[in-house]
Image: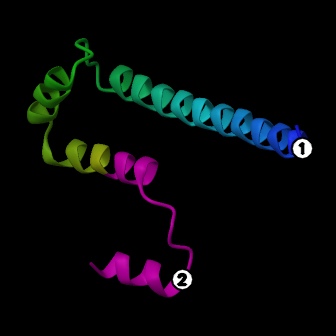
Amino acid sequence: MKNSGLKGALGALAVVGVAFAAKKMGERRKFMKGIFEEYDIKERTPFGFADKIRELDDDKYAELKNKFKTQFSSKCCHKSACKAEKAEA
């Protein structure tokens, strides 16, 4: 066992990665549960969600779309110039 220290460090890193992923999944699940409660969606399937979206008026649809865009947007671009390009598009 020459690399037991390395194996231990990689194991600890894997545990941290799994914990981070579980935390992120929990946050997204909580967000979706809030959306279901706010828009009074009883059916917890994608089809029930799509049916409810079809029933929304334009203002509520735009509000819901904006919530999803801010929650699930990619955070890979941190430069202000790139963000300005995305805002124009």
Quadrant position of the N terminus in the picture: top right
Where does the magenta region start and end?
66-89
Point out residue 26 in the picture as x, y percentages from the top left corner. 55, 27
3 versus 32 height, above or below? below
Q: State the residue position of label 2.
A: 80
Q: CA distance from mark 1 to mark 2?
A: 47 Å
User: For the point 36% across and 76% down, which residue is it?
Assistant: 87
| Number of numbered callouts drawn | 2
Which colour assignment does the render follow? rainbow
Give neighbour class at mark 1: few <14, some 14-19, many 20+ (Cα, 10 Å). Answer: few
Q: Quadrant of residue 78?
A: bottom right
* Main SS category, magenta section: helix
- Which numbered dot is residue 2? 1
- Which numbered dot is residue 17? none
Which amino acid type is shown beneath numbered disc 1? Lys
- Residue 17 within the segment the image draws in magenta: no
Point out residue 66 in the picture as x, y percentages from the top left corner. 34, 52
Q: Secondary structure at mark 2?
A: helix
Q: Nearer the viewer, residue 77 or 58?
A: 77
- Horizontal placement of 36 versus 83: left or right? left
Foreground disc of the pair 1, 2: 1
Q: Quadrant of residue 49?
A: top left
Give neighbour class at mark 2: few <14, some 14-19, many 20+ (Cα, 10 Å). Answer: few
User: For the point 50% across and 72% down, which residue is it?
Assistant: 77
